[in-house]
Image: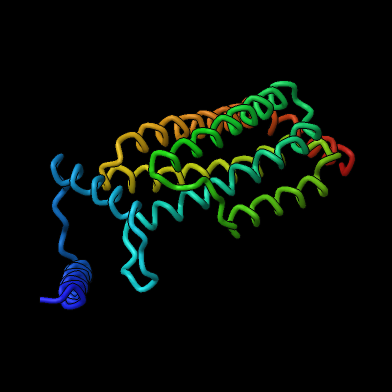
Amino acid sequence: MSTNSTAAQSGEAKKSATTTRKKAREEGKSTTKATGATRTKRSQAVAKRTAARRSQKEQKSLSDLLEHALKDIYYAEKKIYRALPKMIKKADHPDLKEALQHHREETAGQIETLETVFEVMGKRARGEKCEAIDGILEEGESLLEDFGDSVAADAAIIFSCQAVEHYEITRYGSIRAFADALGLDEVLDHIDSILEQEKAADQKLNDLAESSVNDAAAEYDDDDEGAAA
């Protein structure tokens, strides 16, 4: 049997298996949780696929989606790192300034961690333009222009920063799940460390908002009510 014939049969087999799996999902059939051996096999397959040159027509897989997500968040983290100084400069509350500065330092470390993840996967660290984070950051800049010199500046900054944090938490949560399903335990550990930092940053912002920032901004509305009366 010729090499071309074997490759064609292999391609048809993969196409058939994909069709079967998609049909099962459409029918709502559940998938059995992968065993340790299966996860190991998957991680080896990812490594093998990475080493080989893939044709453009080959079926996309979860490892491709993981790579896309990593490029997406790598781009996002770099954009966030550059956007934070404006927020820090406009913040009034010293604890908010400190929290934002601390998280900017964490972000620098997260960028390095993502570069390590790319290396582990045998990929070059490269970002891919993400319209979602661009939109969130543009809205943040707009809010800073509208509220940056007002008594609600800190509340607006937290409002914007938490939108960023929630975006990151959902993205890293998905990346974590992909790495887990593919048996990429080293990648999983790195992503877990970043995810914990993002959750802690979001909680810190939430605590600041609820403990003082929102009430301080609301006092201005109390003054308005008194003046109106």
How far across and how far down the image is residue 124, in percent? 49, 47
Q: Relative to residue 160, is residue 30 drawn left or right? A: left
Q: Relative to residue 164, is residue 38 drawn left or right? A: left
How far across and how far down the image is residue 143, in percent? 76, 49
Q: Residue at x 75, y 35 (%)?
A: 85
> In the figure, residue 160 lies in which quadrant?
top right
Give above or below for 178 relative to 130: above
* Observer-nearest of 33 and 72: 72
> In the figure, residue 35 lies in which quadrant?
top left
How far across and how far down the image is residue 176, in percent? 37, 42
So how many labels did they put on this image?
A: 0
Q: Relative to residue 189, is residue 202 drawn left or right? A: right
Q: Is residue 23 visible?
A: no
* Observer-nearest of 23 and 14: 14
* Residue that protrudes farthest toward the left in the picture: 1
Quarter of the image with the C terminus is top right
Give above or below for 94 relative to 110: above
- Which color scheme did the rendering employ for the protein? rainbow
Q: Residue at x 31, y 68 (%)?
A: 59
Give above or below for 80 relative to 25: above
Q: Residue at x 26, y 47 (%)?
A: 181
Quarter of the image with the N terminus is bottom left
